[in-house]
Image (cartoon, rainbow, N blue to C red):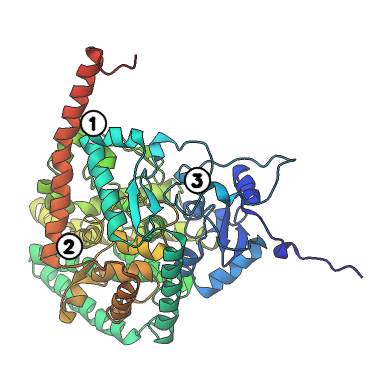
Amino acid sequence: MATTTSPRDRVWSRREIEGLIADGRKIFILDGQVVKADAWCPFHPGGDKAIRHMVGRDGTDEVRALHSLDAQARMRKYVIGRIEGRWINFTPPIQGGHFRPLAGNEDQEDDTGSQTDGDLSSRSNTSVPPSPIFDAVDAKVRKTEGGSSVYTTSAKDTADVQTNPIEAKLSAERASDILKYPSLDYASQDKIIAKYRELDARIKAAGLYDCTYSSYAIEACRYSLLIAGFLVALHYGHYAIAGICLGAVTHQLSFTVHDAGHMGITHNFHVDTCIGIFIADFLGGLSVGWWKWNHNIHHIVTNSPEHDPDIEHMPFFAISTRFFDSLRSTFYEHVMHFDAFSKWMISAQHWLYYPLLLFGRFNLYRLSWMYLILGQGPRKGPAWKYRYLEIAGIIFFWTWYGYGVVYCSIPNNWDRFVFFMLSHMVTMPLHLQITLSHFAMSTADLGVHESFAQKMLRTTMDVDCPTWLDFFHGGLQFQAVHHLFPRIPRHNLRKAQDYVREFCEETNIPYVIYGFGEGNKEVIGRLGEVAKQVKVFEECKKACVKDIAEGRGLDH
């Protein structure tokens, strides 16, 4: 009797999967299994872009980091087969990857030989050049006889570096990262992946994924004191103090929203989503759905100028000269123009950084309303219905805050203005804490073969602070640890930090940590460096125009 093979047991070659992706299929690898996520994309609570950034890649570590075991189990419904051996990542189409359709008479065996272990920076194994808007890392890593990594460039790249100081700076950043971090060869990255998974198992065994609810009882007492201070000050007409107290409780509550967004409180999607909506929308006037939509992408493509919305702040800030190329944001789906206004703002961004952060909350209002009104979130699945609850929550917020407090409880326009501005500006440390962990870190793209753990530690830094001050930072001082393990409750991150330090020592990945003051200096220094390059950029442009006008820039 003939045995039938389940479709899930089918072995797919890399070339066959490339053909499926060329046909528009959303394919990624999870634990050696081939997942076809087309049917799930419209239902994914984190949005379809999070899936699109995993197309053609082994997304095992990203999926495990950001999803519960139940969610991972549900993904098995979309398995169409498996692979054999080590998977060699493609560059996802959303990041500029090119894929060849599979011809009917084509040999369907793997063609991994076209991308060798010594060419790990290349973004795809196809012969089609990448789009200029998604310029790939030009750095190549070749193995020497001694096993060390050597940074090499093509003749054209070398010429660009020699004639363009902006490109020279970017090239130097890539070279620095390649020398500073473990080699991108498969053996080195596989070792890091294995160590990271062992670390995750140890942290789970230590119970650090379990929420300590007693810590939230202490948080609730702190929130209650601040709310009481707000109400008492409002009652007795001390409107500036009332605004400061309300801003302070908003700042503190934001950390609980962050926990809920990562399902770090109850680990139940619906319960934590409702907690997040109650705090963010009903009490704060911001959309937690927008935050999750944005934040999930940030955790996947951290510090990528084209893809990470958390560093896309044109025309106000640019943390890399890459933004001078008027990059197209794959998240916002528009070009971030480097125009006259941008040049003026960025040339002074190291002076404007703190003043602009005072108004950060107003931008979040805008983004929240755009997300909800335009329906940018999931239209199907478990998250779609929360859009209407969020709209109701934001209307409720402006009813109690805008009408009930600002208009009805404060007698004159000047006091209203003072209260309104202070209640928003006091949240400025939150925006500082969010940007502090990434603005001074690398934005270089080392290619799709860099492991998840190494990339998170290369693009994120921690902030050193005493234990008694943890409440002020709300877990954001452990962003490197958090990026490795997003679902660990924040009250356990300090304990997890010791495990991460040990992991970094074992894998030779630098663990970057600064004091709060030193971290601020690093950020201001980075902003100042980019600001100086605006002038260099303009001088280069003028020189190029002059050369072309005089005929020196033309090929003969």
Looking at marks 1 and 2 on the same chain, the residue that comes earlier in the sequence is marked by 1
Looking at marks 3 and 1 on the same chain, the residue that comes earlier in the sequence is marked by 3
Residue annotated with mark 1: 163
**Residue 429 has which mark?**
2
Question: Toward the viewer: 211 or 436?
Answer: 436
> Which secondary structure, mark 3?
loop
Circle 3/circle 1 CB separation < 8 Å: no
For the point 60% across and 40% down, the residue is: 100
Question: Toward the viewer: 2 or 156?
Answer: 156
Q: Which picture quadrant has residue 299?
A: bottom left
Where does residue 178 sit, x and y in percent of width and height? Answer: 31, 55
Question: Toward the viewer: 536 or 421?
Answer: 536
371 relative position to 27: left or right: left
Looking at marks 3 and 2 on the same chain, the residue that comes earlier in the sequence is marked by 3
The answer to whether residue 337 shows anywhere in this view is no
For the point 29% across and 57% down, the residue is: 179
Residue annotated with mark 3: 124
Alpha carbons under labels 3 and 1: distance apart: 27 Å
Question: Toward the viewer: 189 or 380?
Answer: 189
Which amino acid, mark 3? Ser
Query: Total of numbered circles in the picture?
Result: 3
Which amino acid, mark 1? Thr
- The N terminus lies in quadrant: bottom right
Q: Residues within 10 Å of mark 1 (few under 14, many from 20)?
A: few
Alpha carbons under labels 3 and 2: distance apart: 41 Å
> Which secondary structure, mark 2?
helix
